[in-house]
Image: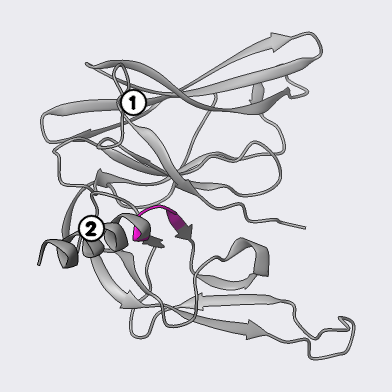
Amino acid sequence: MKTLAAVLLVLSTAALADPQLSLPGAGLDASEVHFRDGQSVLALVVGGGRARLQRVRVKIDVVEAAIGDDPDGDLGRNVSAQGIEPLVFLDGIKGLRHGPVAVAVSGTENLSVQKDLGFALGDTDYRLETRCSAQDSYIRCEISLASSGGTQFLFDAPGGTQLNGVVEFAGAQPALLFAGDLDGDGRVDLLMDATNSYNSRPTLYLSGAAKKGEQVREVAHQVHYSC
């Protein structure tokens, strides 16, 4: 029995060794999708101000060219699950399990250079702050998570000066896609589009993975190429 338990532990650890994240939808490049057709994954389903993590079998369909522009006839992948419209598919991520999820923000909120994005989970208030600074001919905008626990840098994005002199994001629109308690520890977790270019970069930050001095830590991401 000890040998069997050891084998199961190894298999469980291996299953969590490669965190994976994928947005649902059509037209994803094959390199953007690391799930297998029929793979058992968790889907984050959000609606009516509520959310849950649900175990599903992911369906991966190959999108073929209607006209033979692509010699392989393979334009990408369609990622879905029968009977649901999830916000994101997740697998191999420690601390996530089937069940209801406490919600702080349930819909996409674009970040703004001009105004912080505030929200609350339980008794704790949070803010996503954007601070931009000029570096030679380049404007760098830093996005940070702030709360009573401190302020933590998350990622940066390029900024640019408009004709009226106002600084805005340039070539990228970072966004908060979901905020809530995904891993059940009472602290906020974030699903963000942490883009720093014209491409989308959905990224999961979990509080349960945070190290000393951090509130959250990136555990998985997907790069979606826009062109």
User: What's under tag 2, amino acid-wise?
Assistant: Leu
Residue 162 visible at all: yes
Looking at the image, which residue is at 25% across and 37% down? 208
Residue 9 lies within the magenta run:
no
Looking at the image, which residue is at 41% across and 77% down? 39
x and y, in percent, of residue 227 in the image: 77, 58
The residue that disc 2 covers is 9
Looking at the image, which residue is at 18% across and 63% down? 3
Residue 51 visible at all: no
User: What's under tag 1, amino acid-wise?
Assistant: Arg
* Gap between marks 2 and 1 measured at Cα: 39 Å
Residue 85 has which mark? none
Mark 1 is surrounded, within 10 Å at the Cα level, by few (under 14), some (14 to 19) or many (20 or more) other residues, namely some
Instruction: State the residue in front, 196 or 37.
Output: 37
Q: In the rendered image, which quarter contains the N terminus?
A: bottom left
Where disc 1 sits, the SS reads strand
Secondary structure mainly formed by the magenta segment = loop
x and y, in percent, of residue 135 in the image: 73, 10
Residue 19 lies within the magenta run:
yes
Which mark is first along the chain, 1 or 2? 2
The residue that disc 1 covers is 127
Dividing the picture into quadrants, the one containing residue 122 is top left
